[in-house]
Amino acid sequence: MRLAESSVQKVVDHLKKFPNAECPVCHHDQWIISDILFALPEFEYRAPWTQLQPMGGSIGTPIRATIPPVGGSIGAPIRSTFDLESENPQVFPVVPVTCLTCGYVYLLSGIKLGVVPGPR
């Protein structure tokens, strides 16, 4: 979602509270604020581990994509699945801020910034 100029200004005003915002990677202090609000989806752990399967059992139905196990082997203890279609998806709105020198990106909460309403 593209942010209105007033919402981008809220991000700028928030960042002005921290005048010494040095990049933790390259130690420069030149940043660019994205004017696009992104959403981080909730990550849900599930078992058993599967590769890729239709949720409804036929072509054209939503799919469930599986993130490979930690360590890269099928026998790894942690298995995780990200549901691409969920009945109640939980997302966290974020505004990326990128270092102009090295490309390091940090994310600010869209809710804390006031560019989107918080949970009800």
Image: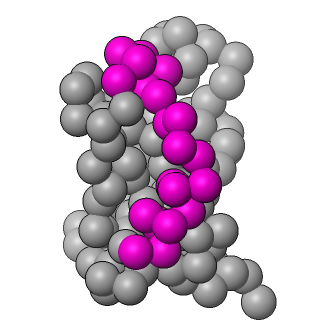
Q: Residue at x 41, y 18 (%)?
A: 27
* Of 82 and 28, the residue lying toward us: 28
Left or right: 89 as drawn, with respect to 98: right
Residue 117 against residue 103 in the figure, above or below: below
Q: Residue at x 62, y 86 (%)?
A: 117
Residue 116 percent location from the top left of the image? 54, 82
Which quarter of the rendering shows the C terminus?
Answer: bottom right
Residue 61 percent location from the top left of the image? 32, 72
Which quarter of the rendering shows the N terminus?
Answer: bottom left
Residue 73 against residue 115 in the figure, above or below: above
Left or right: 102 as drawn, with respect to 51: left
Residue 34 percent location from the top left of the image? 29, 59
Q: Residue at x 50, y 67 (%)?
A: 13
Q: Which residues are magenta?
A: 9-28
Q: Residue furthest right?
A: 120
* Of 39 and 48, the residue lying toward us: 39
Is residue 70 found inside the magenta-colored segment of the image? no
- Residue 81 visible in the snapshot: no
* Of 79 and 58, the residue lying toward us: 79
**Color encoding of the figure:** one colour
Magenta stretch: dominant secondary structure: loop
Is residue 21 found inside the magenta-colored segment of the image? yes
Residue 114 against residue 112 in the figure, above or below: below
* Of 88 and 28, the residue lying toward us: 28
User: Residue 88's quadrant in the figure?
Assistant: bottom right
Q: Residue at x 35, y 24 (%)?
A: 28
Residue 16 percent location from the top left of the image? 52, 56
- Residue 32 visible in the snapshot: yes
User: Residue 12's quadrant in the figure?
Assistant: bottom left
Residue 36 against residue 104 in the figure, above or below: below
